[in-house]
Image (tube, rainbow, N blue to C red):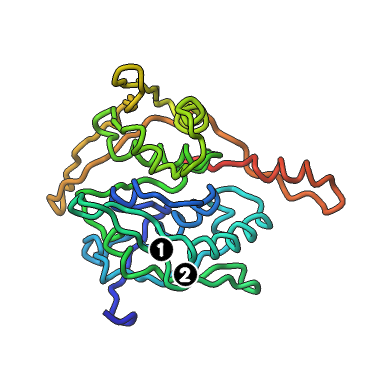
Amino acid sequence: MKKNDLPTVLKSKTPKVYKHKKLNNANFGDFTHSDYKVYLHLISKLGGVDEYGKYLQSEQLQRELVLTAKEFSEVFNTDIHNSYGFLKQAVDKLMKTDIRIEKPDDKGYWRINVCSQAEYNVDGGNIKIQFTDSIMPYLAQVKQRFVLYNLKEIGGFNSLYTTRLYELIQEFQETGWLLKSVEQLREIFAVGGKLKTYRDFKIRTFEHACKEINKNYDMGLNFKELKEGRKVVAIKFSFKKTTVQEVLNPKTLVSRKIYTKPTRTITLEPLEPRLPSNEPKALTDVLSKLGLLDN
């Protein structure tokens, strides 16, 4: 489908991440947290419905997207000057990193590239990317097998592992628990040869992530280690369910689900203005990391 033939997309008022669960569980190699947030922000630009309220499929989605430093700064409440650096770094990472993702039939996995083209524009303060044909089927919008959440929900997290665990929880938000083997978690968190001992892996990844999620949300998130003999082989995470209510539109007679998630427990102040250049750099760095958006 040519660009000019693409349907009109009605966007949500707030950026939302919408992707296949298999992509949600993929290994993103050496992505940093800022790289991953840029990637999620780009994905949020894809989502929407057509004029009839239907979700768009991969061939209908615009795969050339532009993300500005100003947009990134506003969503994640980061210093605008730091946002320029995050975008510039992410351009290289998006182009050179291939992700490892399970095949649809669960038999083996693909290694696919995220972008076929990416560029950083100094004058415009933005990046422009084009998603590959291979990744688009995992971004097509259907109600089954997909994860949906507000991009701002992850704004309060300082760790990539926290964001990845929070995404996994969204898959099972109506059940109140999820189970992953230690090997699956190692793959999702992309630790590679790092954190070789289970103790180090636990402390640095999911244990820290649970604490950070509970700090931000009234979720009651905890985990239980499942063992074979003395070896921990799997982790069961438990948390408060998301309540779901069916609401019928009296005019269209079409029902939709209303999701009520655990409430956010901390509210941070807006980002402080950037300090003059003659101020100590260390203090500038601290201030640039303070603000995190509310829902």
Amino acid marked by disc 2: Ile
Task: Determine the residue located farthest toward the right in the rendered image.
Answer: 278
Coordinates of residue 27 in the picture (x, y in percent):
39, 49
Choose between 267 and 175: the one closer to the eye.
175
The image quadrant of residue 119 is bottom right
Report the residue at 62% width, 49% height from top: 78
Q: Are marks 2 and 1 in contact (CB under 8 Å)?
A: no
Label ID, residue 129: 2
Q: CA distance from mark 2 to mark 1?
A: 10 Å
Q: Secondary structure at mark 1?
A: loop
Residue on which disc 1 sits: 114
Residue count near mark 2 (Cα–Cα under 10 Å), binned few <14, some 14–19, many ≥20: many
Report the residue at 30% width, 58% height from top: 110
Coordinates of residue 126 in the picture (x, y in percent):
57, 67
Horizontal side of 247 relative to 83 (left or right) equals left
Quarter the N terminus occupies: bottom left
Amino acid marked by disc 1: Val
Coordinates of residue 174 in the picture (x, y in percent):
25, 33
Horizontal side of 167 relative to 287 (left or right) equals left
Which marked residue is nearer to the observer: mark 2 or mark 1? 1
Coordinates of residue 125 in the picture (x, y in percent):
62, 68
The image quadrant of residue 233 is top left
Horizontal side of 278 relative to 78 (left or right) equals right
Q: Which numbered disc flags the more N-terminal residue, 2 or 1?
A: 1
Task: Determine the residue located farthest toward the left in the rendered image.
Answer: 253
Report the residue at 36% width, 62% height from top: 112
Asked whether residue 248 is in view, the answer is yes
The image quadrant of residue 177 is top left
Report the residue at 31% width, 33% height from top: 180
Q: Secondary structure at mark 2?
A: strand
Callout count: 2
Horizontal side of 70 relative to 55 (left or right) equals right
